[in-house]
Amino acid sequence: MSERPPFPGDSLAEAGLNRQFVFDLDALPADLRQTLGDTTGYRQLVLLGHGGRRLWACVQASGIASEHPIDDYTVRTVESWLAAQLPGRAYRIVYPGEQPVGLQALGKLAGWHHTSPFMVGVDNEWGSWYAYRAAVLIDFQFSAFFPVDRGNPCLDCRSTPCLTACPADALVGGHFNLQTCSGYRLQPESRCAEGCLARQACPVGAEHRYEAAQIAHSYRRSLAMLRHYLKQP
């Protein structure tokens, strides 16, 4: 059996997609694999994310002016990378897309995050300043990736600034109350309409915190989705 080649992710990292993990499909739990849809003809799943500010800078430099510039930039970047690295090989981008991919579960398997009181995953290096950007089925086999668990920073946190920073008191006792959080975000003049103050109070990975424009962009989208889901104007 020939040796598998290493994953050539340098150009993806340069483009801002600096979190990368490759799963062998036959090693994924069955319930998680089902979230990917039809995987016939594919052998691996590439999970891509970003940590820190670089991706946003790349998106801005790209000049993409669409409703979903980060997704559009990501898809364009991934397709260009696939054409260069795996020419002629079958692939399917399952995220971004309509497929309900279990991104959080995949991230857990990769060792990318631990649950925080404010319900955004936290990593010892990046804090909460990272996101999942793409999941791609490929007809190829790169070298195996192994999860690296850097530990849960919340377990060693004594000051718990996120709990007291929440103006809605949605984290009382260290337990997240979705209804309280959502209700406050929907209020006129809410201080959390364009950013989570609890998240911003977390000291872990603070040096990687998104710039204000990216935070506002992400939270405007989530607020619009919340209003749509609750059928509010």
Image (cartoon, grey):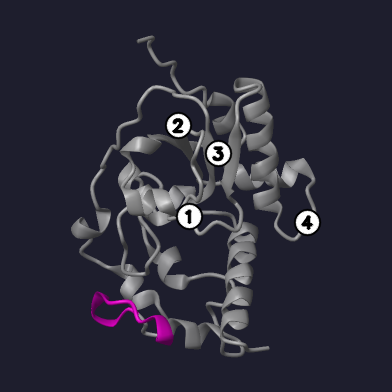
**How far separated are the C-alphas under marks 4 and 1?**
23 Å
For mark 3, give the secondary structure: loop
Magenta highlight range:
171-180
> What is the C-alpha distance between the residues marked 3 and 1?
18 Å
SS for tag 1? loop
Mark closer to the observer (2, 4): 2
> Which mark is first along the chain, 3 or 4?
3
Q: Is residue 81 left or right of residue 138?
A: right
Whether tag 3 and tag 1 are in contact, CB under 8 A, the answer is no
The location of residue 137, given as percent across then percent down, is 52, 38
Instruction: Judge depth for marks 1 and 2 and give the one in front.
Output: 2
Residue 70 painted magenta: no
Secondary structure predominantly adopted by residues drawn in magenta: helix
The 10 Å Cα crowd at callout 3, few under 14, some 14 to 19, many 20 or more, is many
Going by the numbered disc 3, the residue's amino acid type is: Leu
Instruction: Name the disc covering residue 66, or none.
Output: 4
Circle 2 packing at 10 Å, graded few (<14), some (14-19), many (20+), is: some
Q: Earlier in the sequence, mark 2 or mark 4?
A: 2
Residue under pointer 3: 17
User: Alpha carbon of mark 2 to alpha carbon of mark 4: how far?
Assistant: 33 Å
52 horizontally vs 158: left or right: right
Secondary structure found at label 2: loop
